[in-house]
Amino acid sequence: MCRNIRPLNNFEPPATRDEVTAAALQFVRKVSGTTKPSQANQPAFDRAVAEIAHITQHLLDDLVTTAPPKNREVEADKARERARLRYG
């Protein structure tokens, strides 16, 4: 999985539209193999990002969990610690 795509489910407050779109953009970049599509491919690229963001938002809205919501700051601290251990 692309390291730039972050888990979005079960946070308080819920994931924003910008976070969902950013995850969709990273996914499309990974699948397409490009960060900047050509002018000829730009419409298809943008359409894919919009559609994936849309369906991702539906997924997040429909998921059910009994776990308590996660705290963004705590999760960010954990990620920083994992990175520190991995990369020194």
Image: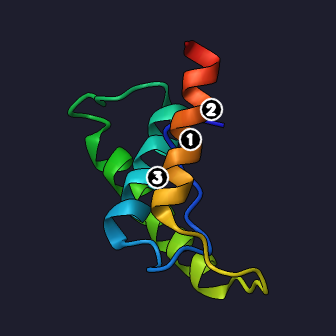
- Amino acid type, mark 3: Ala
Residue 17 screen position, x and y as percent? 35, 71
The furthest residue to the left: 39
* In this picture, residue 10 sits left or right of residue 67: left
Q: Quadrant of the C terminus?
A: top right
Residue 10 screen position, x and y as percent? 62, 75
54 relative to 29, above or below: below
Q: Residue at (59%, 45%) from the top-left corner?
A: 78
Disc 3: which residue = 23
Q: Residue at (38%, 53%) from the top-left corner?
A: 22
N-terminal label among 3 and 1: 3
Query: Do the residues bearing badges 1 and 2 touch, measured as CB atoms within 8 Å?
Result: yes
- Amino acid type, mark 1: Ala
Query: Would residue 48 be seen by someone viewing this image from the given angle?
Result: yes
- Amino acid type, mark 2: Arg
Closer to the camera in the image, 43 or 34? 34
Disc 1: which residue = 79
Q: Residue at (56%, 14%) from the top-left corner?
A: 87
Q: Which secondary structure, mark 2?
A: helix
* In this picture, residue 78 sits left or right of residue 45: right
Give the quarter of the image for residue 63: bottom right
Residue 3 screen position, x and y as percent? 56, 35
Disc 2: which residue = 82
5 relative to 8, above or below: above
**10 Å neighbourhood of mark 3: few (<14), some, or many (≥20)?**
many
**10 Å neighbourhood of mark 1: few (<14), some, or many (≥20)?**
few
> Gap in Å between the C-alphas at discs 3 and 1?
17 Å
Closer to the camera in the image, 9 or 42? 9
